[in-house]
Every structure is written in structure tokens, then in C-alpha cells.
Amino acid sequence: MPQPPRPRPTFPVTLSRPPAAAAPVGGRGRPAAAPPVSGPPSMASDAVRARMVQRLAAQGIADERVLRALAAVPRHAFVDGALAAQAYEDTSLPIGLAQTISKPSVVARMIELLLAAPALADQPQARLGRVLEIGTGCGYQAAVLAQVAREVYSIERLRGLHEKARTNLRPLRLPTVHLLLGDGMQGYAVGGPYAGIISAAGGAELPATWLDQLAVGGRIVAPVQSGNTGQALVIIDKTNRGIERRLLEAVNFVPLKSGIA
Ligand code: SAH
């Protein structure tokens, strides 16, 4: 169905501050002191979340920055009340419009890979610079990314989810998260170049714009179609020597689609 004209610009729609001036890819020497997410205190969910983080560590997530970030973000606040009891299980859950919030283990794995970008390779405590997320969905991963990166630009193509993420994120007051309604296949040049680009939706190939908008020393982590069988995670590093691409384990993400709806 054709969309009626909208009164306000669809792209970019920022949650908070305008894009910052150019910042370095890595945060040299700066510790990644994740600011605690502010929200209503909940001892019960804190304990359940702490156990989720322990399980992730036992499964092999070793980067303290990632574990702290997952411990800081209330995943139950990003899903419908009826699903909140399952929020700390390692499962994807429906978020409406036929989309899903990714499993915590997949979020952790992808962010751990992102933090191992060439520019941060020898800085186990550093924060990433600017990050672009494709597929905001309910906003959960954007909130996790905000714990490990200086600025997060997150694009969603479905207006309903863009609005839902805005509502979900508002109480967390994360001024470094910028929500955009648009087609993530075009990236978001204004916020770049990015230290990291992470996609929560997978297509046949990675859009060339993402590589263009990646800083030297930066890394893309995304699902991509692999043969006829399904998707695999791919990491792409932009280095002084050129582009390096590695295919990793099989994954199962929603499809990357073009246009906004
Ligand atoms: N990171 C999300 C996961 C959402 S699922 C979370 O934490 O909830 C992936 C999302 O990618 C879906 O909401 C889907 O609408 C979106 N998507 C798919 N193709 C897209 C595109 N080209 N641009 C922006 N978003 C896209």
C-alpha cells in the first residue's frame, strides 16, 4: 500500500544530539567505563540478568566490556510484558511486525567480534568510536552498544519498530544513541566513518555503502547468505593493507530488505 506523505523528515530522525565531529576510531587509553543504565531499580531482574551473563561467560564470551554491557541493560524492558519472564533465556523473541529481538548469546558474540576490530586489537579496555547498527528493532542491541561505543547510530526501516525503540529507550536516557528511520542498506554517511558496523538483518551480500562508510581500522559484523543453505556471520576489516573478509559460524537472522515501510 502506498504510504501517505509524512509531515516530518523521515531521514534522519535523531533521538538526541546531532552527529558529533570526527572522532578517532578507538578510544586510545580510555577505559570503557560503561555508564550504568538509569531506570527503575529491580533487584529480581538484576539477579536473573546476572545469571544470564554468567551463562554467557561460561559459553565463552570473554570480553569484560561485553559482559558488563549485557549486565547493564534490562532486556525485559524491550519485550512485551507477556514475554518478560523469558527475557533472560537465550532465545530470540517476537517484537512485532514479524521481527525478533536477537538471542543474548548472538548479541554478545557479535559485539565481542566488533570490539576485536583491528584498531582496538591491542586495547582490551577501550571503547569503540562511532558505531552504525542496521536494524534497530526494539532498540535492545542499540542500548547494549551504547555501553561499549562513544556514539551509536541505529537505523530501522519499519516505522512501527523505530517508534517502539524510541519508546523503549527513552527511560534509559542514552544521549549517545541516535535512532534513524531509513533504509540501512544505504548506511548513514553523516554519522561516519564508523569504527564498527553491525547488522541484525542478513542479505545476499553486504551493501558496498557499508564498506565505504567504515573507517580504516574498523570492522563490519553481519549475517550474509552463505551458499544455498542459510546464513553465516561475516567479518570484514578495513585495514591499511586492504579489505579482509572472514566467514564464521551459521546464524539465522531476519532478511535485510530495502526501502522503508
Ligand atoms: N537489533 C534488534 C534486532 C531486530 S531484528 C533488536 O535488538 O531488537 C532486525 C531488524 O532489521 C528488523 O527490525 C528489520 O525491520 C530491520 N531491517 C531489515 N532490513 C533493514 C534495512 N535495510 N534497514 C534498516 N533496518 C532493516
Image (spheres, grey):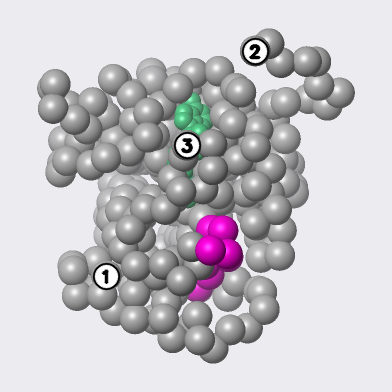
Question: Picture coordinates of residue 93 (x, y %)?
Answer: 42, 53
Question: Looking at the rendering, in which quadrant would you find the C terminus?
Answer: top right
The disc labelled 3 sits on which kind of residue? Ala
Q: Do the residues labelled 2 and 3 touch (CB within 8 Å)?
A: no
Identify the residue at horizontal 14%, vertical 21% (top origin): 228
Cβ at disc 3 under 8 Å from ligand 1: no
Q: Is residue 52 above or below residue 214?
A: below
Sequence order check: which comes first, mark 1 or mark 3?
A: 1
Judged from the image, the secondary structure of the residue bearing numbered disc 2 is loop
Identify the residue at horizontal 70%, vertical 53% (top origin): 167
Does residue 30 appear in the picture of this structure? no
**118 sits left or right of 257 in the view:** left
The disc labelled 1 sits on which kind of residue? Leu
- Magenta stretch, residue numbers: 72-82
Instruction: Kindly give the residue lying farthest to the bottom in the view shown.
Output: 43
Question: Picture coordinates of residue 94 (x, y %)?
Answer: 46, 48
